[in-house]
Amino acid sequence: MEKKIKIGLIGLGTVGTGVVKVLKNFDNIEIKGVAVHNINKPREVEVSNLTDDPYKLVNDPEIDIIVEVIGGCNPALDIIETAIKNGKHVVTANKELLARHGAYIFDLANKYNKVILYEAAVAGGIPIITPIKTTMRVNEFESVAGILNGTTNYILTKMEEEGLSYKDCLKKAQDLGYAETNPTSDVEGYDAMYKIATLANIAFNKRIDINKIFKEGITKITKEDIDFANELGYKIKLIGLARKTENGKIDVRVHPMLVEKDNPMAKIGNALNAVLVKGHPIGEVVFSGPGAGEFPTASSVAGDILIIASELNKYDEILPMARCNHTEFANQVDILDTENSYYISITAKNIHGTIGYIGTICGKNHINILSILQKGLSSDHKSARIIVITEKCFEKDIQNAVKELENIGENDEKFISINNIIRVME
Ligand code: HSE
C-alpha cells in the first residue's frame, strides 16, 4: 500500500474547516494534527490531535506538508520558515505573506529543495497560479488584470443595482460576512494589491516591491460616479493591473477603473472575482469564479496538497515548474509616468466661461478631451456638474491640470472643485 502523506494544518477557520471536509474523501492524505488559537472553541468538524502549538506540527518529523491558512505575517512567516528548514513542503493561502516576504521564503524553499504552493492566495477558488506557471508557460504575457477582491466588487455591484451609497453597501457587505468590522484591507485595496503583486511576479518572472505599487481603494466612489459611468457606457470596478511596458518595465497598480460594459470584466458581479490574461500566443483569456468562501478556497488548498502528494516519495526534486526560479526585482513604473484615459467629475461655479477654463487648462497640459458632459445645474443654479472623459494622456499631466483647475478663482472663492478622477480601462 502506498504510504499516506501526512499534513499539519495550521488554522481551522473557514478555509481550514473546508480543507478538513474536502480531504475526508482522500484516503492517501492524513491530517496528522491541526493547530488552532483556542482548542476549547466548538468546531464544526471533528479533528483529532488539536493543538494550540503550531510548532508541534512544524517540528514533527512525520509531517510532510504544512498547510498554513491563518493569514497575516505574524506568526505565519516564522511557522513557514521553520517548516521549510525542517524539510517540509508548504501550502499556503496567505496573500499578504507572499506579497511581503515572498522573496525570502521562496529563496529559502529553493535552498532546502522544498516547494511552496499558493493557488488559494489569489482569487480563492479560481485556478490561476498553476495555469500561469505551467499550462500557459509558453506565453509572453502582456498584462494581467483582475477583479481580485469580492467584498469591493459586491459593494460596487450593490451601489449600481440598488442605487445605494457606499456606506449603506459596506454595511450590507458586513451583515453578509463579506466585509470585516474593520474593512480597511478590502476597501482601501490592500487585499487586491497583495494579489496583483503575486500575479505580476509569476506572469513576468520578476519580484515585485509592494511599496512601489500605486494603490487606491473604493471609498471615494459615489453613487453619482456610478450613474455617470453607466450613462457613458461603463461600470466601475476595482482592478488590480500588471502590465509590461514597451521599455520592459512593469506597471503594477490597484485602483478603481471605468470598464466598458462589453468588456468581460464588466459582467463580473457581486462577490465574484475574475482575471483577464493577455499574452502571446494565447490571446485573451478570462478566468472567473468565487474568490473566497469555505469550499472554493478549500478546493484550491486541497488541490495544492494533492499536487505535492502525487510527487512526494517519487522524485528527489518535485514540481520544478511550480518553484520560483527568478530572483531579480522588476523595474516598476511610477504612476505619474503611466498613460491612461480619465473620467473627471467636476463641480463648477455657474459662471461664464467655466468650460473654457477646463478646455484651456487641459490643452495647456497636453490633454485631449474625448467628451464633456454638463449635467444641468444645481437646484439653486449656483453650480454645475461636469464630467470630462479624456483621451489617453500622462498621469503627471492630469495631476498638474487638476492643480491648476482647483486654483482658478477670485478673492478666496474657487470656481472649480474636482470630485473624483477615475482611470479608464483600455
Ligand atoms: N477579503 C477577500 C475578498 C477574500 O473580499 O475578496 C480573501 O482574500
Image: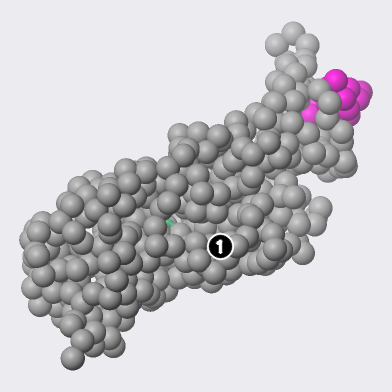
Q: How many marks?
A: 1
As displayed, is residue 203 above or below residue 306?
Answer: above
- Foreground pick, 3 / 278: 3
Q: Taking the image as drawn, is residue 178 in sight?
A: no
Determine whether 385 is above or below 189 in the image: above
Instruction: Give the camera-side residue of 37 and 179.
Output: 37
> Looking at the picture, how far across and down is residue 352, in whole percent?
92, 23
Residue that label 1 marks? 137
Q: Give the residue drawn at x 63%, y 47%.
A: 243
Taking depth in this image into account, of 412 and 126 the one nearest to the observer is: 126
Q: Is residue 152 magenta?
A: no
Left or right, residue 73 beside residue 36: right
Main secondary structure type of the part rendered in magenta: helix
Instruction: Say if residue 113 shows up in the picture.
Output: yes
| Secondary structure under the numbered disc 1 in the rendered image | loop
Between 250 and 395, the one lying in front of the other is 250
Q: Position of residue 59 (x, y in %)?
A: 9, 59
Residue 150's spot in the image, x, y percent?
A: 50, 61
Q: Is residue 354 magenta?
A: yes
Q: Report the magenta residues as a range.
A: 348-364
Q: Is residue 338 left or right of residue 131?
A: right
> Which residue type carries mark 1?
Arg
